[in-house]
Amino acid sequence: MDTAVLEQLLDEAFDHAVVHHGYTDYMRDYEVVVHATADPRTGIAPAYLRYLFRYCVEARCETSVPPGIWRESLDDRLIDHETAADLDGYVWGVKWHCLYPGATVLPVSDVARRWSEALGIDFHEVRMETNAHTLTLVFSELQVSEIPTHPPR
């Protein structure tokens, strides 16, 4: 996959809402579902977009929430938006994360190079940063498609 095309596809997800991420049910590919919206005055309808990272050989998910905020966010009432209303801490119950500062294609890494050599196809490493998680994915291809709704939780 051409790096410029990959960068363009990822740029289109910038600042939208990540509503789901994880390996697909067949456990080879990694998906990130984004709820893309625009200013209503543009006439562009909101859409759920599935970013399918094919042949994903590595997926790391780390928190980007600082330890002090985590300490304040352990209460289970914060996993439900309604019960979190008057509490301090990170409200997990909003059930989405803003894709900000966004996604970046990283320079060719040792792991991507190793997989490229082993399989004979190009591999890429991408970092996706949200306001709660940082995902690092090593994969070969990215496919983006519109889906009717986000996957059930």
Image (cartoon, rainbow, N blue to C red):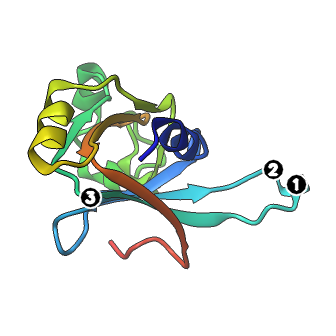
Q: Is residue 118 visible?
A: yes
Q: Which comes sooner in the sequence, label 2 or label 3?
A: 3
Kindly indicate whether the residue at mark 1 contacts the one at mark 2 (C-beta within 8 angstroms). yes
* Position of residue 16 measured from the top left corner of the image (x, y, whole percent): 58, 47
- Asked if one can make out residue 95 in the rendered structure from this viewpoint, the answer is no
Question: Where does label 1 land, which residue?
Answer: 42
> Marks 3 and 1: in contact by CB < 8 Å?
no
Q: Secondary structure at mark 1?
A: helix
Badge 1 density bin: few <14, some 14–19, many ≥20, Cα 10 Å = few
- Can you tell which of label 2 and label 3 is closer to the viewer? 3
Question: Which residue is at 84% across, 56% downward?
Answer: 40
**Residue at the image position 90 percent from the left and 54 percent from the top:** 41
Left-right relation of 117 to 37: left
| Placement of 63 over or under 139, stated as above or below | above
- Residue type, numbered disc 1: Thr
Badge 2 amino acid: Asp
* Front residue of this view, candidates 33 and 40: 33
- Labels in figure, total: 3
**Residue 8: which numbered mark, if any?**
none
Instruction: Find residue 22 and name its label.
Output: 3
- Which quadrant holds residue 104? top left
Q: Secondary structure at mark 3?
A: strand
Secondary structure under tag 2 reads loop
* Residue at the (34%, 36%) spot, across then down: 126
Q: Is residue 149 above or below residue 23?
A: below
Quickly name the residue at label 2.
Answer: 39
Viewer-closest of 78 and 29: 29
Few, some or many C-alpha atoms within 10 Å of disc 3 (few <14, some 14-19, many ≥20)?
A: few
